[in-house]
Image (cartoon, rainbow, N blue to C red):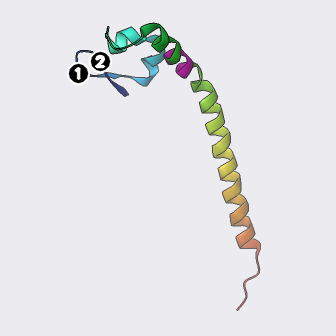
């Protein structure tokens, strides 16, 4: 879940699975200090980047696992000197 503070100054918990389906207005309310057209564009852009972030994070995790395995195999293959 993600917590948002809206214009009524209370926190609203929104399940992450529903964030893409909600409009910024539904989350934050109608606020006089927010440029809603610009915010809507930025909010949409941030949500649209999520699939890319997930793919890059999976790739990073796989590279990390491979690096750890290679280091472990190198350690175990090294001769032990006494």
Q: Quadrant of residue 51?
A: top right
Q: Position of residue 33 (x, y in %)?
A: 33, 14
Q: Is residue 52 above or below residue 30?
A: below
Q: Which residues are magenta?
A: 43-47
Left or right: 27, with 49 as reference point: left
Which of the pair 24/64 is nearer the observer? 24
| Residue, far bottom | 82
Secondary structure predominantly adopted by residues drawn in magenta: helix
The label on residue 68 is none
Q: Residues within 10 Å of mark 2 (few under 14, many from 20)?
A: some
Q: Position of residue 49 (x, y in %)?
A: 59, 24
Residue at 65% across, 51% down: 64
- Depth order, front residue of 16/80: 16
In the image, is residue 14 above or below residue 76? above
User: Residue at left 46%, top 14%?
Assistant: 39
Circle 2 SS class: loop
What residue does disc 1 label? 10
- Location of the C terminus by quadrant is bottom right
Seen at 43% across and 17% down, the residue is 18
Which image quadrant: the N terminus? top left
* Rendered location of residue 22, percent (x, y): 42, 11
Using a 10 Å C-alpha cutoff, classify the residue at mark 1 as few (fewer than 14 neighbours), some (14 to 19) or many (20 or more).
few
Marks 1 and 2, how far apart in space? 6 Å
In the image, is residue 46 part of the stretch drawn in magenta?
A: yes
Q: Which residue is mark 2?
A: 6
Answer whether labels 1 and 2 touch (C-beta < 8 Å): yes
Q: Residue at x 76, y 72 (%)?
A: 77
Number of marks in the image?
2
> In which quadrant of the rendered view does residue 48 lie?
top right
Mark 1 residue element = loop
């Amino acid at each position: 879940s993600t917590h948002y503070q809206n214009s009524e100054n209370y926190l609203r918990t929104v399940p992450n699975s529903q964030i893409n389906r909600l409009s910024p207005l539904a989350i934050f309310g109608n606020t006089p200090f927010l440029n809603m057209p610009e915010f809507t564009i930025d909010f949409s852009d941030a949500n649209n980047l999520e699939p890319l972030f997930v793919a890059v994070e999976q790739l990073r995790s796989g590279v990390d696992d491979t690096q750890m395995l290679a280091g472990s195999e190198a350690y175990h293959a090294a001769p032990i000197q006494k």
